[in-house]
Image (cartoon, rainbow, N blue to C red):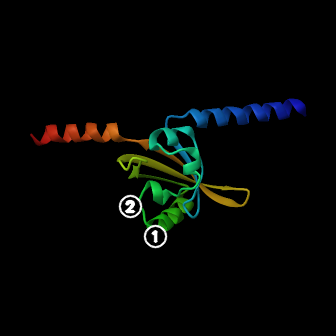
Amino acid sequence: MQQLARQHLSEIELYNSTVKNLRDQIFWVGKSGKLIRVNEAVSKRSGYTDAELSNMTVFDLNPSLTKETWDSGWIQTKLEGQVVLETEHRDKEGSFYPVEVTNNYIEHEGLEYFCSSVRDISKRKTEESILLAGRIV
């Protein structure tokens, strides 16, 4: 029994270490849009501290997002299980950067969440612009 408990604890520690150290930003978000938990990459990219982020919502990071859009996206993601979209996030300095968001619907202990993986796609967008400019000329 102790061996099994140690094995489960080791597995949990591996998952935690992996998520903590991912380059992608990971968000756990409640149905209202409140940020429940984030990994270190969110603080690094956004410039907000963990304490600040714990008091924020998705609407703070994406001011163009409306409650209506959020609610319809929640329903769509709940039905499909996963939805991928592109949008922009705003960092603490007020600068916007393009992101690709993968929202995953999760139910855990009777609560509904999104576990969202967010990737800064600034480099990709710049490269696309360069390629498009080259085709136009």
What residue appears at the point 54 percent right and 60 percent down from the top-left corner?
33
On the image, the x and y values in percent for residue 45 come to: 45, 40
Q: How crowded is mark 1: few (under 14 residues within 10 Å), some or many (20 or more)?
A: few
On the image, the x and y values in percent for residue 92 come to: 43, 48
- Which residue is at the front of the view, 57 or 132? 57
Say which amino acid is labelled 1.
Glu
Compared to 117, does 13 lie above or below?
above
Position of the N terminus by quadrant: top right
Residue 64, numbered label: 2
Query: Residue reaching furthest left?
Result: 137
Q: Tell whether 61 sits left or right of 49.
A: left
What residue appears at the point 61 percent right and 56 percent down from the top-left corner?
113
- Which residue is at the front of the view, 132 or 91? 91
Look at discs 2 and 1 and give the one toward the viewer: 2
Say which amino acid is labelled 2.
Ser
Query: Residue reaching furthest bottom?
Result: 68
- Which residue is at the front of the view, 4 or 129? 129
Q: Residues within 10 Å of mark 2 (few under 14, many from 20)?
A: few
- Which residue is at the front of the view, 47 or 102? 47
Are dots 2 and 1 in contact, CB under 8 Å? no
Q: Tell whether 17 sits left or right of 43.
A: right
Compared to 126, does 106 lie above or below?
below
Position of the C terminus by quadrant: top left
Measure how far apart labels 2 and 1 are at the Cα level: 11 Å
What residue appears at the point 46 percent right and 42 percent down from the top-left corner?
47
Give the secondary structure at mark 2.
loop
On the image, the x and y values in percent for residue 53 come to: 55, 50
Residue ID for mark 1:
68
